[in-house]
Amino acid sequence: MTARRAWAVVAPLAERHDPHARLRLITSGTDISHEGRSRTWEFIFLLPSRNATVMLSLEPDPHSEDIDTAPCVLTQRISPASSLDTKEPSLPRIFRDSPEVVAEFIARGVDYVAGPTDMKLEGRVLPSGEATWITYYWDKEFATPFTAANQVL
């Protein structure tokens, strides 16, 4: 599935935990395809009213015999927030979807077909405060804006 499709599942769950949930991280599994799809997506949210963080993971059922046809399962992990968690900036809730981002990285030379087998796509906020999508390809980091210039935040 794409990042946006996974988001459609996890965002309402995060909001049920806390209506003011703030997105901190999105990461695909290490199986991100050249189409921008992954079988696994993880999202980390700060839950300010609960002083906690929640990691919501969508992944194939580990008990299924065939990963390609396995149903998707959701795992929730809630933990206390640290003082650093409450101060870090959040990602926008509207973002460029993974197929668009992967297509851009491919145009810049990243090979999701013949490249390393442990590639992933990650959305996070840099120390500069910039929200960005990142991938690593042969020890080189590729980055691109998390949102499109014309997207309304």
Image: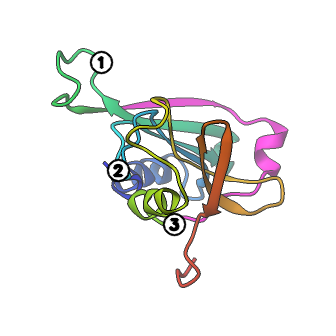
* Residue at image mark 2: 9
Q: Nearer the viewer, mark 1 or mark 2?
A: 1
Q: Residues within 10 Å of mark 3 (few under 14, many from 20)?
A: many
Q: Is residue 46 visible?
A: yes
Q: Is residue 91 visible?
A: no
Q: Are marks 1 and 2 in contact (CB under 8 Å)?
A: no
Q: Which residues are magenta?
A: 74-93
Residue 59 locus on image (x, y percent): 35, 32
Q: What number is the disc on residue 95?
A: 3
Q: Nearer the viewer, residue 42 or 80?
A: 42
Kind of residue at badge 3: Phe
Identified at 55% across, 75% down, the residue is: 148
Residue 144 locus on image (x, y percent): 62, 62
* Residue at image mark 1: 62
Mark earlier in primary sequence (2, 3): 2
Q: Secondary structure at mark 1?
A: loop
Q: Nearer the viewer, mark 2 or mark 3?
A: 3
Q: Residues within 10 Å of mark 2 (few under 14, many from 20)?
A: few
Residue 77 locus on image (x, y percent): 52, 29
Mark earlier in primary sequence (1, 3): 1
Quadrant in which the C terminus is drawn: bottom right
- Indicate whether residue 122 is drawn in magenta: no
Kind of residue at badge 2: Val
CA gap between label 2 and label 3 equals: 15 Å
CA gap between label 1 and label 3 equals: 29 Å
Mark earlier in primary sequence (1, 2): 2
